[in-house]
Image: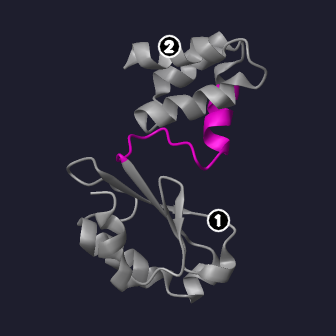
Amino acid sequence: MSMEYQKILAKYADTPGGMLEAFHAIQEELSFLPEEAIIEASKVFGQPAIEAYGVAGFYSMFSTEPRGENIIRICESAPCHIAGASRVVASLEKELGISMGEITADGKFSLEFTQCVGQCQATPVITINGKPFYDVSPEAIPDILAEFR
């Protein structure tokens, strides 16, 4: 694992704002930001470790915990909640056999909450690896997940 993130950090070392781009690339490769990659980034970019942790922690798209291959995020804003997001959550949990915040045993799926994804006209909304699904009903979950299995 270390070689992968070290190569990525080196690629962005001379890029203005490169830490953010490197973190995106590392997460794309590993599905999360390992602690050792954050510490190494602070050295590569000449920043205190607290700054690198600040970048990793500030943006909701970054995770410092291992995640599944397919990251399912459901909006927990008021419009989605009112539109039945809790029923969609229950359907996701039942279909995958995990609870919010967990990873399936095969490492294929993670379930996470997120804040508004800016699609309040089509609630509830879920994203899988950033791809949005609108007006999601509990009944639609098996078909949506089939695309990623």
Left/right of residue 124 with respect to residue 51 in the rendered view: left
Q: Position of residue 60 (x, y in %)?
A: 61, 50
Where is mark 1, residue-wise?
A: 117
Q: Mark 2 — residue?
A: 6
Q: x, y percentage for residue 32?
A: 46, 37
Residue 115: horizontal and vertical position, in percent?
Answer: 62, 64
The quarter of the displayed image where residue 109 is located: bottom left
Quarter of the image with the N terminus is: top left
The extreme right residue here reads: 16
Expressed as whole percent of the image width and height from the top left, the position of residue 43 reads 63, 11
Q: Residue at x 33, y 66 (%)?
A: 145
* 44 shown above or below 90: above
Disc 2: CA contacts within 10 A as few (<14), some (14-19) or many (>=20): some
Which badge, 2 or 1, comes first in the chain's sequence?
2
Residue lying at 23% horizontally and 66% vertically, measured from the top left = 97
How far separated are the C-alphas under marks 2 and 1?
A: 32 Å
- List the single residue furthest toward the front: 147
Q: What residue lies at 47% left-to-right and 21% top-to-bottom?
A: 36
Left or right: residue 112 compared with residue 115: left
The amino acid pointed to by label 2 is Gln
Near-viewer residue (111 or 25): 25
Location of the C terminus by quadrant is bottom left
| Amino acid found under the numbered disc labelled 1 | Val
Q: Which residues are magenta?
A: 51-69
- Residue at x 54% of width, y 73% of height: 125
- The kind of secondary structure element at disc 1 is loop
